[in-house]
Image: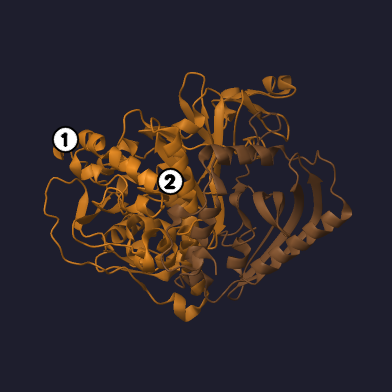
Chain colours: A orange, B brown
Amino acid sequence: MRARDLVDWEFGTVERRIFWDEAIYERELERIFARSWLFVAHESQIEAPGSFVTTYMGQDSVIATRGDAGAVHVFLNSCPHRGNRVCFADSGRGRQFTCNYHGWTFGIDGALKKMPKMGLYKSTPGFRMADWGLKPARVESYKGLVFATFETEAPSLGDWLGDFRWYLDAVLDAEDGGTEFLPGGATRSVMNCNWKFPADNFAGDIYHALWTHLGGSEPTLGRHGGVKVENEDSFQVSANGHGWEFNQSFLGNAAAMGDRDLLRYMRSREAAITARLGEFRAKMWGSVASATIFPNFSFLPGYFTFRTFQPKGPTVTEIHAWTLVPKNMPEDIKDRFRRGSMRTFSPSGLLEMDDGENWEQSTTANAGWVTRNQRLCYAMAPPGEVGRDDLPGDVTAGQLSDANQRLFYKRWAEMMDAESWADIPLAGAAPAEAAE
Amino acid sequence: MSAILDQKPDYATYPRLTRDGAREAAAQLIAMRGKGAPVKPSRLSEIEAFYRLEARLLDEERYEEWYGLLADDLFYWLPLRENRYRRDERPEFDPEAMALFDECKADIAVRLGRLRSNLVWTEDPRTRHVYLVSNVEAFETAVAGEFEAHSAFIQYRNRSEHDQAMLCGRRRDLLRMAGDRFEVVRRMIVLPQSILLTKNLSAFF
């Protein structure tokens, strides 16, 4: 099986098999999830030394902690002795993790510290404490977002994100003082869909909003949804499989939360954000847009919901979602984002409720033999001029397009077919000063 | 006919709580631990009848009538649940934290606006609901005509062919006598699931 035979990223077709096949899913765990940089936490979730959160990298349960010296550690949440899980809390603070099975105890950095009747091991020839810590991952951050990978051959996080960093600053560096996740942990829910349907949707499918979200956006945007999406002055940009579709409306997404005071506040920040980021990126801040950092970390400017689509099998995905805000934002405005993002993009959200249904049915339809042998269409490629040559990454004109999704599946196929990281192409990033 | 059936509702004019009002309501719900005197049996019976009515209106998608049972100063809250160690000193329910519902009456009206747009493909064909409410206890409060009520529920939903979701939980309510009937002033819904084992909460509790 060659993944590149399952995906035609030039015209744009995809074999449905990639959404249900158990063998393909197993290979994704190995070749996509075990060697990508995966989002694990926002630094604000583990600010104090000793604080931790648990999450997943692929289907590997991991713990992310703040060490005593301030460094973030990420390691497997599985005791190397008999394999039991060592941490059962979603978050907390402590000095150590002790396995319930035999009492092996690990430090906040994951190193094995002690176990009952240690003398039995001390007298065991060849046993070294240093060999039996919780398996550590490589950890790097970009402007508050902590990523990790277990792949020693992977490039740096900076090279992995490449040109996407310049765009990421539109949500991660719009205001002075950095960002934070609002408190309370992740909103988590289960969908019976393949993880790639939500991931490709966020990478570049604003097209669905014109139909899927008509009802959900009617109360806030007006009769019959009022979702306005045009290909004039809007773009898709991709780098290394990461994709962002957006327009230049500054607060088009935010408007769907239906909070006029919040929109007034956002307007009041436009001049300062423009001074900081330049006009082009400032207008991306809360605009009609969506993005995916390959493979499964997505966000929506404006609502500022950030989420991972955690794979739990070829046809089961968990959504873990948080809301990101600038740290210096007034408390009242943060609270408006908390409630606004909940009311639109959470399991009770006016908009998210309609997405899940689509992705589940797109997945379950493949039970049919004839159905599953029909390719899906990712061919939309309207012509248009970008009109400027200073934008980094692969840029196409018009946000109504399948361009990013074709590049998402190109990257997927490249990683699936590559024997090692050396075989995976990486786009060279433009120097940061190339644009604005 | 309720105001929410107007063609172009201006939700900004609908009843809202201030942030402080919502926090005060949350604090009151958190403090509701059945400390007051139990209501007399006839009052308990009236409250149980009210819950049966509410469940039937929701089962039959009579949302406008259900909306009419909500007080203008409604606070309606479904907090997230986290797995935490017993030694963890953080409060289990924090009104500043992310939630699944954190609503005033105007927010409920917005949700109903979605449903009656006739553009919600996921509710067409309709979902079939059965809502069971049980374990009802009610207590007097410091305010005459306001009652603290606790109940447990099972909410079953089925739609399409194999699509189903069953949620069990507890509710803490503050009910107020409004003329000859009750209205819901505050409601906290406590689900046991830390990961919602279904794709959405396209329902009311």
Which quadrant is the N terminus of chain A positioned in?
bottom left
Can you give x and y, in whole percent of width and height, for residue B89 in the image?
66, 28
Disc 2 residue type?
A: Phe
Tell me the kind of residue under disc 1. Glu
Task: Say whether residue A50 is left or right of residue A197.
Answer: right
* Left or right, residue A382 beside residue A92: left
Mark 1 vs mark 2: give the one in front: 2
Question: Which secondary structure, mark 1?
Answer: helix
x and y, in percent, of residue B52 in the image? 75, 64
* Residue B26, quarter of the rendered image: top right
Question: What is the C-alpha distance between the residues marked 1 and 2?
Answer: 27 Å
| Chain letter behind tag 2 | A
Task: Please tell me which residue lies in front, A216 or A89.
Answer: A216
Residue A409, percent from left and from top: 34, 59
From the viewer's perspective, is residue A126 above or below residue B201?
above
Please identify the quadrant where the C terminus of chain A is shown: top left
Check the image and report above or below for A22 versus A305.
Answer: below
Report the side of A83 relative to B112 (left or right).
Answer: right
Query: Residue B204: which disc?
Result: none
Nearest the eye: A54 or B45? B45
Q: Which mark is residue A306?
A: 2
Figure disc tally: 2
Could you tell me which residue is drawn at 14 percent across and 39 percent down?
A: A434
Marker disc for residue A433 = 1
